[in-house]
Image (cartoon, coloured by chain):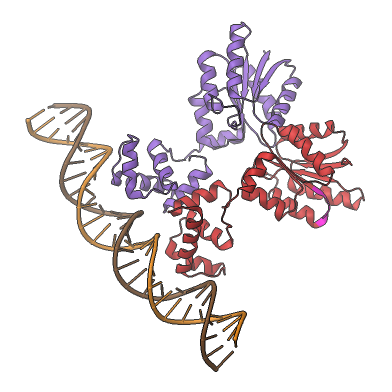
Chain colours: A purple, B red, C orange, D brown
DNA sequence: TATTGCTTTACGGTTTCCCGTAAGGAAAAT
DNA sequence: ATTTTCCTTACGGGAAACCGTAAAGCAATA
């Protein structure tokens, strides 16, 4: 039972054009699209009020800021907001993100129905995903399934991220306890800071803080 | 004088579709496309041999690896290889990259003719870029021009980049002289390393190495 | 209340880093 | 050849980070 009404939230105009074209090729005629998260939520709520709801939301994860200030920042927040008003809409995420932990979270915590990565054969993958979801299955491409399985990445929590952020801003390690107290983050002792840094370095097989900063920058953690 | 023959090197199928569509809308009918760098170079050389050369290459920067092992890795290498066989072809880079240093390098060192970022209004930007380049102008969108202009007060040279790379890989500062000697980079003394680090931190108003690593990651310097 | 187990904090010794100063060395100028 | 200048290297004292261990806090349990 193919979808009838689809909403596309994607800020790259070129990519949005392609998604529309692909949808069209599947014979879905009632398609709306937007370049902004706030608009996407607005269209969803409006369609509910009009008693003509969307069946599927195809959304990117990263949206760039511009002059139009948004309340909703990024695809994750959008999915949460949409789920809050329209719990049963199917959601297909279409993004370049390929970090196992992040994708795993999308399925487990946000309950998305499919994930297609912007990559070499994304057009065919997108069609397959829409097809699968319309038949009440979930979709995740084979290569990503493997990556998700072997996710042995360290889970950074708020304390970890705060510590590394402070370091990357030039705060002396011995002064970090003061900053943590200001933010009411516990534990805040210098030894705890040292312990956490050692845990992170141990888990990732690093020896220096500089490596942690580089790693967190690479993976968008800070 | 609009282009007649255009080659598209772009590994994301969806994005490639959109680029083709955009080109078509400009009235350019002789278009070839490929998902691989090696194929792109091959098509360029073949067109030269056939005495029917391409006028314009539109290429992405990042290409993902897959089962087809490539000699040319990424858009930068592709541009260098293409320039080597066909010096006068116009080159338009179409990428998500928004690091000032990287984009600046593309124009100054690789001599590209235009840069369009994959972003909100990329379709209209791509058309404008092709239009501009066909009139022997270069193209860089206004927002990126600003970023490139106000780029770093400090010019990182090979020594700087090597030092910061080593730090970000976990090498102890006191061991850096050894690594520099292995790479035959001079000066290599520990004091010189310290001096350089201080120069960089002074110029950027930083106090710790962690800040330098974060900065260089942000601007794509390492 | 006392015990147990766990987490957080405090402390001291060692290593590394930081920073100023002085010595060494090469190239240019006289 | 000598001086000047600039850059590189060496060294040493003090600050910060690193690391192990011990003490203190705290919650759960009996």
Q: Is residue B71 visible?
A: no
- Decide: is C15 above or below B141: below
- Is residue A71 found left or right of B94 in the rendered image? left
Residue A1, image x, y percentages: 67, 13
Residue B115, image x, y percentages: 72, 43
Which residue is at the far top?
Answer: A51
Residue B181, image x, y percentages: 53, 70
Q: Name the quadrant of the N terminus of chain B.
A: top right
Camera-side residue of A62 and B151: B151
Residue A30, image x, y percentages: 71, 14
- Residue drawn at x 51%, y 69% is B188
What residue range appears in magenta? B85-90
Residue B87 magenta-highlighted: yes
- Decide: is B97 above or below D27: below
- Decide: is B212 above or below B93: below
- Residue drawn at x 41%, y 48% is A201
Which residue is at the far right?
Answer: B51
Camera-side residue of B64 and A72: A72
- Residue drawn at x 58%, y 61% is B158
- Is residue B140 found left or right of A192 in the rendered image? right
Q: Is residue A136 visible?
A: yes
Magenta residues, dominant SS class: loop
Camera-side residue of B54 and B161: B161
Disc count in the image?
0
- Decide: is B150 above or below A95: below
Residue A158 magenta-highlighted: no
């Amino acid at each position: 039972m193919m979808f009838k009404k689809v909403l596309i939230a994607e800020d790259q105009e070129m990519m949005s054009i392609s998604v529309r074209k692909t949808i069209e090729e599947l014979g879905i005629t009632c398609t709306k699209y937007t370049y902004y998260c706030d608009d996407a939520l607005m269209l969803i709520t409006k369609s509910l009020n009009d008693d003509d709801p969307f069946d599927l939301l195809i959304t990117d994860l990263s949206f760039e800021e511009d002059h139009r200030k948004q309340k909703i920042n990024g695809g994750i927040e959008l999915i949460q907001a949409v789920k809050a008003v329209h719990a049963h809409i199917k959601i297909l995420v279409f993004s370049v993100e390929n970090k196992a932990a992040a994708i795993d979270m999308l399925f487990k915590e946000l309950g998305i129905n499919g994930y297609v990565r912007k990559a070499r054969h994304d057009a065919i993958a997108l069609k397959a995903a829409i097809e699968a979801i319309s038949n009440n299955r979930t979709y995740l491409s084979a290569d990503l399934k493997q990556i998700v399985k072997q996710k042995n990445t360290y889970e950074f929590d708020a304390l970890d991220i705060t510590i590394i952020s402070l370091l990357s801003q030039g705060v002396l390690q011995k002064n970090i306890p003061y900053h943590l107290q200001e933010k009411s983050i516990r534990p805040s002792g210098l030894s705890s800071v040292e312990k956490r840094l050692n845990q992170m370095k141990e888990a990732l097989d690093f020896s220096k803080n500089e490596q942690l900063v580089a790693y967190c920058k690479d993976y968008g953690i800070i």
